[in-house]
């Protein structure tokens, strides 16, 4: 029996038209919601299921994506099926979806700006001249470079892991630093509930990382992002306080002459 295609998820990719590399350029044009939605797809929350589906598409894994493993449960059955027109039709569709994912812009928006701070409020640090913004906290932390509940490996995110121990209990979170003037800082502190940060990105492959929390210690494959645009704005006034492109820093091994 043929499995129903997962169009309910693919529709968010099919509707996206790549209209500009300008999402990875910094200019003075206001980043309006209409403009952002016209060139990128809001992924909302990429939970484990959505993340796995993206990975299956990028790997062109016909058997997992269309749940064909129970039917083709031996190596020979799979080999024969892969030579059929039905399999080739599945593969053709997946290649189309893979191309759309790799060539589309996406974004997630965290509201409010200090959503992931748990019981701590976001506070401007005068000596550092900016804010430390938490992206995930405590039990939510599963792997590095994570944003809230999203199972995407934001490898370009300039975040750092922090830990503290209280009465023998270790708390773990991740945060990034945003340099801002004191005048912008006080405006954000006075209206933090109307402020948010937006991460605009393209998915450029997969990466297997170590999954590490109190429940498990193994590896997980995730959609990878090695370039992103980070924007902090006031959702009400549309004032942009921060706008910068980040790219993964690739460390090359030095070669010594003998």
Image: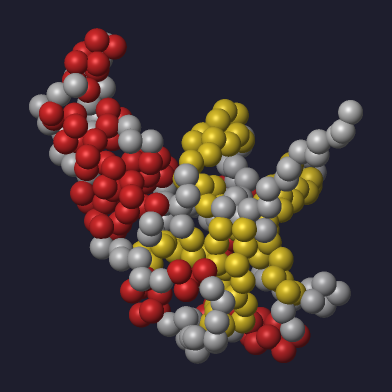
Q: Is residue 145 left or right of residue 183?
A: left
Quadrant that contains the C terminus: top right
Camera-side residue of 17 and 157: 17
Quadrant that contains the N terminus: top left
Residue 123 in view here: yes
Query: Which residue is located at x 40 percent, y 74 percent?
Result: 36
Quarter of the image for residue 83 reads top left
Quarter of the image for residue 170 reads top right
Q: Position of residue 41 (x, y in %)?
A: 36, 64
Q: In the displayed structure, would residue 196 be above or below residue 102? A: below
Q: Is residue 183 left or right of residue 146?
A: right
Quarter of the image for residue 117 reads bottom right
Query: Which residue is located at x 71 percent, y 66 percent?
Result: 177
* In the image, farthest residue toward the left: 1
Q: In the displayed structure, would residue 154 be above or below residue 15? A: above
Q: Position of residue 27 (x, y in %)?
A: 55, 82
Camera-side residue of 195 and 74: 74
Query: Which residue is located at x 38 percent, y 36 percent?
Result: 59
Q: Position of residue 29 (x, y in %)?
A: 49, 86
* In the image, farthest residue toward the front: 258
Camera-side residue of 200 and 142: 200
Residue 42 in view here: no
**In the rendered picture of this protein, how many numbered marks are placed on residues?**
0
Query: Which residue is located at x 33 percent, y 74 percent?
Result: 38
Give the colouring mode of the picture.
Answer: secondary structure
């Amino acid at each position: 029996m043929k499995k129903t295609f997962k169009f309910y998820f693919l529709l968010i990719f099919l509707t996206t038209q790549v209209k500009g590399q300008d999402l990875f350029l910094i200019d003075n044009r206001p980043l309006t919601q209409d403009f952002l939605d016209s060139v990128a797809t809001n992924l909302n929350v990429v939970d484990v299921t959505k993340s796995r589906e993206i990975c299956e598409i990028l790997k062109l894994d016909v058997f997992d994506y269309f749940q064909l493993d129970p039917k083709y449960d031996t190596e020979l059955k799979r080999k024969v099926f892969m030579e059929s027109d039905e399999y080739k039709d599945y593969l053709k569709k997946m290649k189309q979806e893979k191309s759309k994912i790799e060539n589309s812009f996406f974004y997630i928006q965290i509201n409010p700006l200090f959503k992931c701070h748990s019981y701590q409020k976001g506070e401007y640090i005068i000596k550092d001249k900016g804010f430390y913004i938490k992206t995930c906290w405590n039990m939510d932390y599963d792997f590095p470079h994570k944003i809230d509940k999203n199972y995407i490996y934001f490898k370009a995110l300039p975040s750092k892991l922090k830990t503290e121990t209280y009465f023998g209990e270790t708390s773990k979170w991740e945060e990034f630093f945003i340099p801002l003037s004191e005048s912008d800082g006080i405006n954000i502190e006075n209206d933090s509930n109307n402020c948010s940060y937006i991460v605009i990105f393209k998915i450029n492959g997969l990466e297997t990382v170590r999954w590490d929390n109190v429940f498990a210690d193994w590896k997980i494959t995730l959609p990878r992002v090695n370039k992103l645009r980070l924007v902090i704005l006031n959702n009400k006034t549309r004032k942009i306080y921060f706008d910068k492109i980040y790219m993964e820093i690739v460390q090359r091994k030095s070669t010594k002459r003998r």
